[in-house]
Amino acid sequence: MNTALSWIKAYVPDLDVTPQEYLDAMTMTGTKVETFECLDKNLKNIVVGQIKSIERHPDADKLIICQVDVGDKTLQIVTGAPNVNVGDKVPVVLDGGKVAGGHDGGPLPEDGIEIHNGKLRGVESFGMMCSIEELGSDRNFYPEAPENGIYIFPADVKVGADAVEVLGLHDTVFEYEITSNRVDCYSVLGIAREAAATFDKKFVPPTVEVKGNGEDVNKYVSVEVADKDLCTRYCARVVKNIKLAPSPQWMQRRLAASGIRPINNIVDITNYVMEEYGQPMHAFDLDTVEDHKIVVKRAADGDKFVTLDGQERTLDREMLMICDGKKQIGVAGIMGGENSMITDNVSTMLFEAACFNGANIRKSAKRLGLRTDASGKFEKGLDPRNALDAINRACSLIEELGCGEVVSGVVDICEPLPELRKITFCADRINALLGTDVAEADMLKIFDKLELPYEKNGDSYVMTVPSFRQDLEGVADLAEEVARFFGYDKIPSTLPSGEATTGKISFKQRIEQKAAEVAQYCGFSQGMCYSFESPKVFDKLLIPADDKLREAITISNPLGEDFSIMRTISLNGMLTSLSTNYNRRNKNVRLYELANIYLPKSLPLTESPDERMQFTLGFYGDGDFFTMKGVVEEFFESIGMKETVTYDAKAGKTFLHPGRQALIVYNGTVCGYLGEVHPAVCDNYDLGTKTYVAVLDMPSIVPLASFDRKYTGVAKYPSVTRDISMVVPKEIPVGDIEAMIRQRGGKMLESYSLFDIYEGSQIKEGFKSVAYSIAFRASDRTLTDDDVNAAMKKILNGLEGMGIELRQ
Amino acid sequence: MKEKLEQIKNEVLSQVGACNEVDALSEIRVRFLGKKGQLTDILKSMKDVAPEDRPKVGQLVNETRAEIEKVFDEAQKKLEKVLRDAQLKSEVIDVTLPAKRAEVGHRHPNTIAREEVENIFIGMGYEVVEGPEIETDYYNFEALNIPADHPAKDEQDTFYINGEYLLRTQTSGTQVHVMEKGKLPIRMIAPGRVFRSDEVDATHSPSFHQIEGLVIDKHITFADLKGTLGEFAKELFGQDTRVRFRPHHFNFTEPSAEMDVSCFKCGGSGCRFCKGTGWIEILGCGMVHPNVLKMSRIDPEQYSGFAFGIGLERIALLKYEIDDMRLLYENDARFLKQF
């Protein structure tokens, strides 16, 4: 909301502050000022001059030489403007003065343009006559200015006067950010009330008095509200013998500062009161209102209606319409109809000030794609009491400005007004909430300033909340009023007392931190991906049509198809990020992500889905499948999962290389999978290199993890190592050999390690050579050969049973 | 005898003096001190000395032996030092050659910011809790005093799944989950991902992160809120940081405020970074609205509390001077490596 300081001062006459002081103080009492603009910032030394004579320039057809009286002297000024005549009064910028912009109306330079005496085609010129564009404005806000040429003042302006003053440009426009609860502050009066309280000045609202012509308004119009749920009040007044004319300068200037274009006195008064009271109004040409009857009711689905901007709109049955005896003449609270708008021929007019349901207006405006100043005000939910005040204010301005004859009386169709809320309060309670020690008398003074009436009631007080402050619901709200004007900055800073609490993160969060740590040690950097993605992702990942992963939660109003489903697999984000890096020529990129996937328990969603944290790793460049396997095992070990991890090559992941993938199994629990990305999937992601991924399902892992550590004694007795060399059928994975060693090795088995694996010419077809080193140790004695031989025999028998030949 | 010893000593001195190799020195040592060495021979001839002279001669022999050993030891040390010096000299490296680094990974700037914030509050006794990202309308809005027709609920801000479920627009719903558990007092923060239907650009993302904070106890005041968040700002932005609380409005707090911190670029004198105001807006906060307490079955007559919400990306962008929010989701290694 933008408002001129001069308008605020109209109701707070004693206000005398600099723009910066105003900004700071208002912001600290809760009426946040975003910024301000001094309209005269770059206007310097500009006076009203009168053209005394005009002669042609001897050397230029398009230039003229004017002698201009600027009060204390007469200056010779050369101009190319086509519109000036002898006797015209014009703005003249003197030598060394400044204007805001060029005559072409282009963007205004930050520091304006300085004007100096000079010569134009050999003729001396002392200063410059200005167009409205050079004064930093335009014809939208000064409709009387010529399209191309010097601005001409009315004849009664005094020669030598400050032209900027005459134009009403010694003013500052403030831009406010009003919070949604302060509906009253979407009006000049509301802000003025806050300003008066902020600076401790008197608030003087306008006095409203309508004389009327003695006729009865009911003879001119009747009103029926059919849908009272959407319209709690409808006030109508009639003005006849309308004399359309421009509104006075002060009104035009205030509207212009609010960003509203002056049109004529009637339209301007409507807009002026909307800004002033925050109450939108509408004016109908009464002669177009059939049967002189207003009916407020819902439209029917599919109704067509032409709004006053000439657009045809399609209505539905939740949109409230203003109708006359026969037809629709306006969309309630949003925009009037072309069929009833005020034209230059208007003679009798109907003023409307109503209170419509805010939520309904908001939804209707949205469905129509038509948000207007009026709908923007209505949708906040207006005070029904304000409607009558506003319509009376408009009519008093009609009389004051001589725009027409106001018919006496108001048609006022009003639901019973809600009773004013009462809040019981006492100073102690407010101080207890704020942690302050504000004296009761000071609190009451604050309420007085804000025009919040209260009465003493025993030990406490009862406030009767005025209707313009419906945001005040209870003591907490009153505490805020006290805090705002006592000063947020004066409230002390303390730390909470009371029972001590333990600061901590959960076990799950600790596991996640470990995951991040291990990933980083292993060279992986953390990425962050969106939770929503495109349903096309499943095809990209070659996920079968009937796979459960395709059962994803759909967003009903997504930003687009690419962000329309909640991911059920974390790989798309990882592969997309790796692809971005690959295509930017980044070498050896390793990324990890810790974020959720969202698995519905049922679709459509009727209960909260399963949000599963996934620890996703991916890389390309140096390393292979076993590098990734190493990261997984480092992670498991770091969270106390020290038993053997097993890998099931039959993972069945369509997006991974069929011969290079495995489920990660710990103690019988599948914790995730890893593998090389299927080359076809790499192609789909534009990844021209081997890429490896691992996905660990954290909810499966957390219950297996532990941070308990127990020391086992460092061995005192020596270990005995035996090497075995085998010829193994190719299809037996070494994992099976290791399982056999573990199973048969007995208590003395300390460790085993693969030290050679070979396939090739020396080994018979269909077999591979594998060699292990196996270590045995006892904690209580030195092992004998017999001990070790017995253990080895068991192992070897087992291996032979698997079809493995031992090489001597 | 005495002359003989003197002679041996002189011979040792001259031979050792001429020796400049460790091996040669050992040979000389053996020649004089070894089992068949000259000095050993003299000891052997002690039996020819008159018994009454033996102590005196013995002492003389021992003294000479000690002197000779000392000569050898010193020579040995000297020669070793020469050798070591030569070795060290030959091993000089160019220390400006490139380092061999273990390639470690990097945390996401958002995570760094989150953990910084978390650690400050953990130090003040806050528990870190989590809540669901797909929420019900009740937890995201209604229980936070945002009634059915509030404009914030308008479709243009919220991603809906259906009439009941939505993607949470704020982490504040986690407050309600914690309050409903009924365990008091509460000191918690809830970091997490939130969603709003904003198109992606340099300052907007449809998915971002917040940290919600909540304290509920007897006698919690607005002054406590100021003190706590003031401490937090000092910890996060430096001890010279000043804070400013401005009145604001949130449905679930009353009184409400926005907190600004003095600009950490210019210190508050005004610069382009802070748009000349000297202040940077950091978070929203307030005293928990009595309606919110009541809905979560906490008696507002007995308990009070404060809540705050911090935009994590805002902190990360400000602290690390990242000028485009899109960088956070691109995962370009050259970006991530800087953190």
Image (cartoon, rainbow, N blue to C red):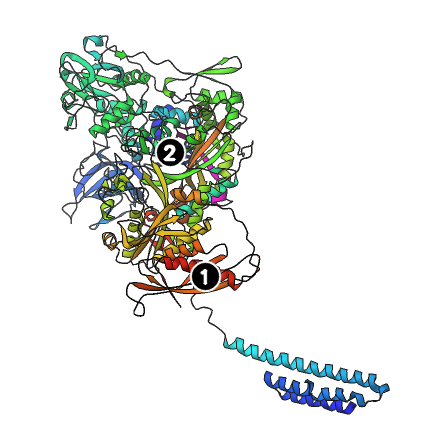
For badge 2, the amino acid type reads Val
Q: Residues within 10 Å of mark 2 (few under 14, many from 20)?
A: many
Q: Nearer the viewer, residue B182 or A560?
A: B182
Residue A285 as seen in the image, left or right of residue A783: left
Name the subunit of mark 2: A
Q: Quadrant of residue B171?
A: top left
Mark 1 and mark 2: span between their CA atoms?
78 Å
Name the subunit of mark 1: A
For badge 1, the amino acid type reads Ile
Residue B272 visible in the current orientation:
no
Q: Residues within 10 Å of mark 1 (few under 14, many from 20)?
A: some
Residue A425 visible in the current orientation:
yes
Image x and y of residue B66, in percent: 73, 81
Residue at 16%, 48% (x, y): give it: A58
For the N terminus of chain B, the quadrant is: bottom right
Q: Nearer the viewer, residue A678 or A193?
A: A678
Which residue position holds label 2?
A: A33
Do residues under tags 1 and 2 come within 8 Å of each other at their CB atoms?
A: no
Residue at 41%, 17% (x, y): give it: A465
Which type of secondary structure does the marked residue at label 2 adopt? strand
Residue at 31%, 11% (x, y): give it: A416
For the magenta stretch, what is the residue range?
Answer: B234-254
Q: Quadrant of residue A354?
A: top left
Are discs 1 and 2 located on one and the same chain? Answer: yes
Which residue position holds label 1?
A: A774
Residue B13 as seen in the image, left or right of residue A78: right
Look at discs 1 and 2 and give the one toward the viewer: 1
Image x and y of residue B47, in percent: 80, 88
Q: Nearer the viewer, residue A773 or A117?
A: A773
Image x and y of residue B176, in percent: 42, 30
